[in-house]
Image: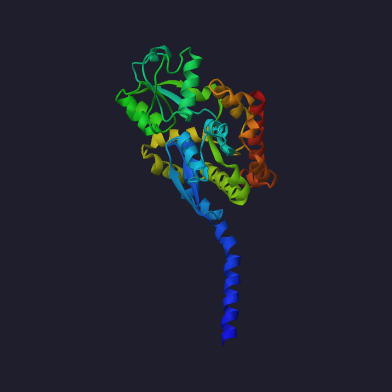
Amino acid sequence: MKGLIACKLIVLSFVLILGFPTVASAQKLVVGYSGVTAIGAPFWVIKEAGFFKQEGLDADLIYISSSSTMAQAMLAGEVAISTANSQAVIDTGLQGGDLVAMGAIVNFVALYVIAAPEIKSVADLRGRPVGVSRFGATTDFAIQMFLKKYGLEPIRDVPIVQIGGIPELAAALSNRSIYAAAMSYPMGLVAQQAGMKMLANLAKEEIPFVHLGLTTTRRFLKERRAQAKAFVRAYGRAVHFMHTRKEESKAILSRYTKVTDPAMLEGTMQYAYDFVEKIPQVKREAFQVTLDEIAKKNPKAKQAKPEQFYDNSLVQELIKEGFFVSLWGRLSYFHQLLNFVFRVLEA
């Protein structure tokens, strides 16, 4: 009897030891998004359409209002994968952080400058506060580039006020706490319906910038590469879902944005279709332009190279494996790839 009990204990111990790697590989992920914006919809679709589960990922999706705040949560180990932008990746990297963009949702600034109706031109912003979500966020980068283009020095000529998320920017515009802000859709549409005006469409400028990334840490990419790759696949599936199951995608968009007006939902979905990458390769120039801008204030950026901050290897693996072709078909896939190549050559 004692021998039988001992044997059972040995077998049980062996099973438990073998089980540890399985438990580790199934470790829960925390995934973060930092904007209530249609171009961030792939993250919502990944969750709501079941692509986390399809790719074998046990994940929670959380909202943190800006890339700079998100970056700190990632460095603290609280978030594994997020939409953090190229400025957040570089800012933390120059201070010794290990954030890396393993993909890009949008490779250029896709925002609109929405202003109070009394603002007739960019010059009218002189001396009047302009809002950003957080310092270091995409809204901050975009509005500073915009003001400089038209001869206004941020802070000196135009006060920059940190407000919060995009919905908070819309509210601040309506009560005149600020007179302009760089906003995405749908909140840009909501603000215009409330009487605000579009002062500029920054998307037409095609300013290279990883507006939203598939961002992680180099440690996660090395130690949990299979999960990182599964997430990139889930992203690809989500974007395909958005294009092929439009009504279901609009319902998901409405749930997260609280927009119910059919025309606004249609416009918001089109905004996502126009800018979200089907093949999420990071564009080198997106990091170069960000480095150039940061170098004006931080000398360390002058010595850095764009390749220090992004890694397209997972996307390249999926391309070679035929993953994107399996989603979009060969002709559509090559059309997307050629578009990406042409944009790189034109940058």
Most distant residue in the right direction: 320
Residue 269 appears in view: no
Here the colouring is rainbow
Q: In this orientation, which residue lies closer to the viewer: 201 or 17?
A: 17
Q: In the picture provided, is 275 more to the left or to the right than 65?
A: right
Instruction: Please state the horizontal and vertical placement of residue 260, each as a whole percent of the image.
Output: 36, 39
Most distant residue in the left direction: 175
In the rendered image of this protein, does residue 45 appear above or below residue 272? below
Image quadrant holding the N terminus, namely bottom right
Instruction: Please state the horizontal and vertical placement of residue 161, each as a whole percent of the image.
Output: 38, 24
Instruction: Please state the horizontal and vertical placement of residue 101, each as a whole percent of the image.
Output: 58, 38
Residue drawn at (60%, 84%), measured in percent from left and top? 3
Most distant residue in the bottom direction: 1
In the rendered image of this protein, does residue 12 appear above or below residue 21? below
Instruction: Please state the horizontal and vertical placement of residue 76, each as a whole percent of the image.
Output: 49, 43
Looking at the rendering, which quadrant does residue 25 occupy? bottom right
Residue drawn at (51%, 38%), measured in percent from left and top? 83
Q: In this orientation, which residue lies closer to the viewer: 155 or 288?
A: 155
In the rendered image of this protein, does residue 59 appear above or below residue 328? below
Q: How many marks?
A: 0
Q: In the picture provided, is 72 more to the left or to the right than 125?
A: right
Image quadrant holding the C terminus, namely top right
Residue drawn at (37%, 14%), measured in percent from left and top? 127
Residue 336 appears in view: yes
